[in-house]
Image: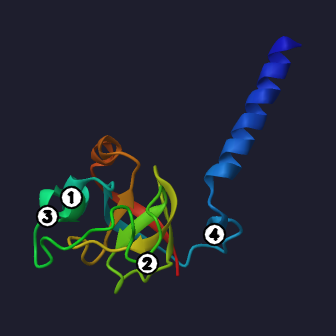
Amino acid sequence: MNSGLRMGGLLLVLFWWGCASTPEYARNLPPASEVRRLEVTGYCDCGICCNWKRSWWRLGKPVIASGPNKGKAKDVGITASGTRAKRGTIAADTSVFPMGTILYVPGYGYGRVEDRGGAIKGHKLDLYFDSHQQALNWGRQQVNVRVWR
């Protein structure tokens, strides 16, 4: 009886975790409109991934580290769509995958295009991770991604 209770509890936890890990926008989707093989990388909101550094002349506030906007204030963790980056945030070339496009990436889960990156051109995605190490662990992969437009 004790192992039955443990197994039932385990099933309940797995059921709860599965539901909780699927974002609201991805529930009850119709079949994917397409499947594409894409190059998929990872990023986080650190200065290495997002090209920012702390500026002594701005009292330690973040600024863009290089490029045409070098030295301008940087809102760390805020996406191009204005949302706060979190797991499920995807950066893409918005001429290929417009803002709001929902994608399912095997090994990562559901996400929505809410950001774009300077190096994300064409059929590439950048997945948000909570840490730089998690983004490095993901690396660069070729993945069959389901797409809902």
Query: What is the crowding at mark 4: few (fewer than 14 residues within 10 Å), some, or many (at least 20)?
Result: few
User: Circle 1 — which element?
Assistant: loop
Residue at screen point 67% across, 50% down? 20
Lower position in the chain sequence, tag 2 or tag 4: 4
Q: Is residue 24 above or below residue 20?
A: below
Tell me, yes or no, whether the two marked residues, 1 and 4, touch with CB atoms within 8 Å: no
Q: Which residue is mark 4?
A: 25
Q: What number is the disc on residue 59? A: 1
Q: Is residue 73 left or right of residue 105?
A: left
Q: Which residue is mark 3?
A: 65
Q: Is residue 111 left or right of residue 116?
A: right
Q: Nearer the viewer, mark 4 or mark 3?
A: 3
Whether residue 51 is visible to the viewer of this picture, yes or no, is no
Q: Nearer the viewer, mark 1 or mark 4?
A: 1
Between the residue at mark 3 and the residue at mark 2, the CA separation in whole angstroms equals: 21 Å
Lower position in the chain sequence, tag 1 or tag 2: 1
Q: Is residue 61 left or right of residue 9?
A: left
User: Circle 3 — which element?
Assistant: loop
- Residue type for callout 4: Tyr
Q: Is residue 63 above or below residue 82?
A: above
